């Protein structure tokens, strides 16, 4: 059974990372039964792409973002970053 009722991929991914340690003795069976083969495959692919720095986890990046948003110069910095990211878009 796949537990996806009203939860996003990232919520499921973080839960998978947290609970995985508890089920290391039969991790493959547990993963398949809890999340399904397709979702587990996506989790493994996401691990390789989203986490090139092993010590900087998704939760760490979320904490960095939360800290940055609370800085006094964030509104100006945010506009600057948005302009920069928009300039990187492909022209069609």
Image (tube, helix red, strand yellow):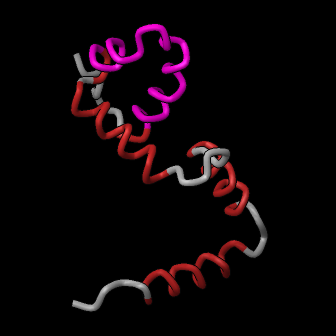
Q: Residue at x 56, y 45 (%)?
A: 58
Q: Residue at x 65, y 48 (%)?
A: 56
Q: Residue at x 48, y 81 (%)?
A: 85
State which quadrant residue 37 falls in.
top left
State which quadrant residue 55 falls in.
top right
Above or below, 4 relative to 53? above
Above or below, 54 relative to 21? below
The residue segment tinted magenta is: 11-33
Q: How many marks?
A: 0
Using residue 28 as the reference point, say whether residue 83 is left or right of it: right
State whether the magenta stretch is mostly helix, strand or loop: helix
Q: Is residue 20 magenta?
A: yes
Q: 65 or 52, which is in the foreground?
A: 52
Q: 67 or 29, which is in the foreground?
A: 29
Image quarter where the C terminus lies is: bottom left
Using residue 12 as the reference point, say whether residue 91 is left or right of it: left
Q: Residue at x 37, y 37 (%)?
A: 43
Residue at the extreme top? 25
Image quarter where the N terminus lies is: top left
Q: 25 or 7, which is in the foreground?
A: 25
Using residue 37 as the reference point, say whether residue 68 is left or right of it: right
Above or below, 79 relative to 38? below
Rendered location of residue 76, percent (x, y): 67, 81
Q: 71 or 81, which is in the foreground?
A: 81
Q: Is residue 25 magenta?
A: yes
Above or below, 92 relative to 28? below
Rendered location of residue 4, percent (x, y): 28, 28
Rendered location of residue 45, percent (x, y): 35, 45
Rendered location of residue 77, percent (x, y): 66, 79
């Amino acid at each position: 059974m796949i537990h996806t009722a009203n939860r996003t991929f990232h919520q499921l991914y973080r839960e998978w990372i947290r609970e995985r340690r508890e089920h290391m003795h039969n991790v493959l069976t547990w993963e398949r039964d809890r999340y399904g083969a397709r979702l587990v495959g996506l989790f493994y692919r996401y691990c390789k792409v989203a986490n090139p720095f092993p010590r900087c986890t998704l939760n760490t990046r979320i904490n960095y973002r939360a800290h940055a948003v609370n800085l006094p110069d964030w509104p100006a910095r945010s506009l600057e970053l948005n302009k920069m990211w928009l300039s990187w878009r492909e022209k069609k």
